[in-house]
Image: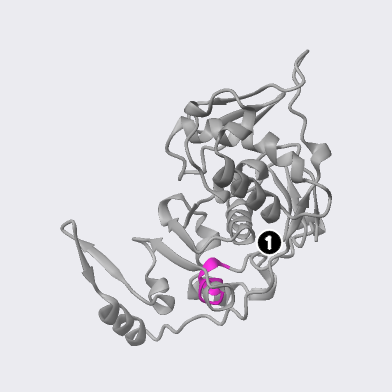
Amino acid sequence: AVKIRAEDGRRIEKVNISEFISGLPDDADTIAFSTDNASGSTSQAANIIESIEIGTDALLIDEDTSAGNFMIRDRAMRDLLPADKEPIKPFIDRVRSIYTARGVSTILVTGGSGQYFTVADHVICIIDYKAYDKTREAQGISESLGHGPPDGGCFGAVTDRIPDSGSFDPSKGRRNVKISAKKSHTINYGRHEINLHAVEQLVSPSQTNAIAEAIEYARKYMDGVKTLREVCGLVMLDLEREGFGILNGKRPGQYAEFRTLELSAAINRLRTLRVTQK
């Protein structure tokens, strides 16, 4: 499972977000979408696609940290603005097909939109700090209001990406390799800072220390053929077999276990990253 949120300002490198967004200004290519300063909606779309690309089983989404226009379009807005004039296909239109086509579930915390009742398998309501199954009542309310599930179509293929080792430069000043982690959510990689504040599943600076070194270790597998998922998978396999000592051979006691999802999230947020789509 991976936490998904809007992440204004993050860099995105050739991610196929066309399942959610198309027809952006200046004919921006959403099949291989790149930007140095993502909006709330484009960043949330990219965060979902990147997670599916790496192999997540479940998306965890909180309405409070999501882009509103990415999550829903109510009936009035759909009537006012035809779908072919709106660049964003909201998440509510895709959530069912993400599960049926990709096997990826979603757990959504929401307090403002009952539209998701139409696509939910289960509705759990918190009343006086206790959890109650309100699935039947929620479905009845949707039926009484004439709300049916949106026709989102089938969720298409996710495009794998191949990282370019040449876009990773850990040098700084006279040092060929200068890598360090600051607390839980910042990595200094050479002259560049990797911001992981939106990667909320990281809970320990020791995880970030390990990820910082694992990024450099991953370059040995970046041969211009292997996808990001394959590269990260090989790193995780080596760590499982050999332990943290393979990362730099000096201080394995300062490391804690992380997942493929966190390693790929850090690589995706390196602002010099270049990839080619497979």
Identify which residue is drawn at 76% across, 40% down.
Answer: 220
Identify which residue is drawn at 26% across, 80% down.
Answer: 137
Residue 163, horizontal then vertical, whole percent? 77, 48
Residue 171, horizontal then vertical, whole percent? 76, 23
Amino acid type for the residue under numbered disc 1: Ile
Q: Main secondary structure of the magenta part?
A: helix
Q: Quadrant of residue 160?
A: bottom right
Q: Is residue 250 at all visible to an observer of this figure?
A: yes
Residue that carries the numbered disc 1 in the rendered image = 17
Residue positioned most to the top: 174
Residue 129, horizontal then vertical, whole percent? 18, 56
Residue positioned most to the front: 242
Between residue 83 and residue 168, name the one nearer to us.
168
SS type, badge 1: loop
Identify which residue is drawn at 74% across, 64% down.
Answer: 23
Between residue 247 and residue 53, name the one nearer to us.
247
Image colouring: one colour
Indicate yes or no whether the magenta region holds residue 11: no
Q: Which residues are magenta?
A: 90-97
